[in-house]
Image (tube, rainbow, N blue to C red):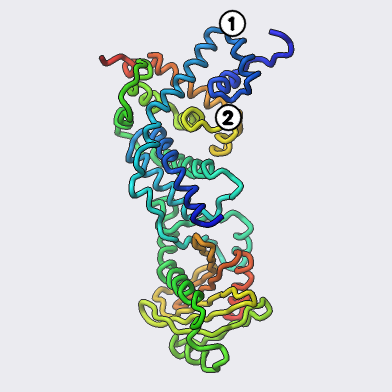
Amino acid sequence: MADDDLDQLVIEQIPHLRRYAMALAGDRDRADDLVQDCLERAWSRLGLWRRDGSMRAWLFTIMHNLNANAVRKAKRRPRHDSIDDALPQPAVPPSQDDWLALGALSSGLAALPEEQRAVVLLVGLEQLRYEEVATILDLPMGTVMSRLHRGRERLRRHLAGDAGPALRRVK
Amino acid sequence: MSDQRQPVTEDALHALADGRLDPARAAEVAAALTDRPEDARRVADYQRINAALHAQFDPVLAEAIPARLRRRPKPRWTALVLGGGWRSVAAGIAAAVLLLSVGGVGGWYARDAAMAARQEQAAIVRPAALAHRIYVAEVRHPVEVRAEEEHLVRWLSSRLKIPLKTPKLDTAGFRLMGGRLLPTDRGNAAQFMYEDTQGRRLTLYIRSDLSGNRETAFRYAQDDSGVGMFYWIDGAKGYAITAQMPRAELLDLSKKVYEQLEE
């Protein structure tokens, strides 16, 4: 495969990386920082990509590792910003579906532990197979499924209103 | 539920919601859910969550990619930083080694290592890589003074103010073509070029005008196009062996060079 083709494989994935990073980081600037770090690392290590593997999975693995490291670092610092500050701006106007009104989905995602959020998004948003998610996150399948289960249930309860004021209608 | 049916597990509910079951199994699970309204609602809710994720985040796919993400960085020399000397090179090649991407993600690596690596980039990796790129591509004038001219080594030794010698790589199939004098930011450097019968070229870059009093281990760097380099710094002297070939082969050649130079 020529280098240009290899470049193209990476470039094709940028929109997907941005979508996932937006959902994961909950903030546009942080998301694009994450994508940029991911791409820089990918470009510099392109020679290490196994050509029989999935470029998408490889890039998501890099992004996951970068994000996990950033999250670890952030945890060591005291947090002063409230969770509300981290909510993404709605990318589309609210849908007709009230309980999935965008604010609730965002606050629900933000309220998930990082590890559950990643699984919920890789499965639900990126539509990756469970095996691929296990590879990307370097986890056993059982752990992926239990995080998926706990994450989805937590998100579901949040959206159903158990989480309190975040879900109240603001009409 | 008949005995042939597999039980409807938690995993099966998620797999149904995600469309990961084959049609027969999906129908089976869906049928079982008619008796289990709470589970049926969960599956429906999971699907609505997936749909909501797409509704909220899919618009990002259609956005123009910001310029800072579109730009592919220039090929960058990345160094595999190995501790110790030869022994750890051999060990390091076999083991997973720390890939240090210079100037990459800030704070990702130990600051000292990053700083030292940046200095090495400027001192030896970059100038040697540039000289390699330019002159290996030369068909008619790859060298300034041919190997047959016996003043080659004497001349470059006097310019670099150190006694030079040209390592012999004939046993590995590489013949010395000659050399040239190169400028550095502070003085002179020398480049010797070798070629094998397949026309592959290898360069040995030497400079003797470094300021620090440092010694480095033997290190490896490579660019995105597969050109590799082994280099080391010994006080004011810096050496780099550069060629487009697999790392193991370049390592063999570099050992030969190193052993002859350090004799």
Question: Which residue carries the number 1 mark?
Answer: B35
Name the amino acid type tagged 2: Thr
Picture quarter containing residue B16? top right
The label on residue A143 is 2
- Front residue of B89/B201: it is B201
Task: Between label 2 and label 1, give the one nearer the viewer.
Answer: 1
Q: Chain of mark 2?
A: A
Residue B48 x, y percent position in the rendering = 45, 19
- Front residue of B74/B247: it is B74
Query: Can you say which quadrant of the picture contains the N terminus of chain B?
Result: top right
Q: Is residue B260 above or below residue B72?
A: below
Q: Distance between the Cα atoms at labels 2 and 1? A: 29 Å
Q: Is residue B251 left or right of residue B50?
A: right
Q: Is residue A115 above or below residue B100?
A: above
Query: Can you say which quadrant of the picture contains the C terminus of chain B?
Result: bottom right
Q: Residues within 10 Å of mark 1 (few under 14, many from 20)?
A: few
Secondary structure type for disc 2:
helix
Q: Is residue A51 above or below residue B219?
A: above
Give me the residue at 43% from left, 43% from top.
A14
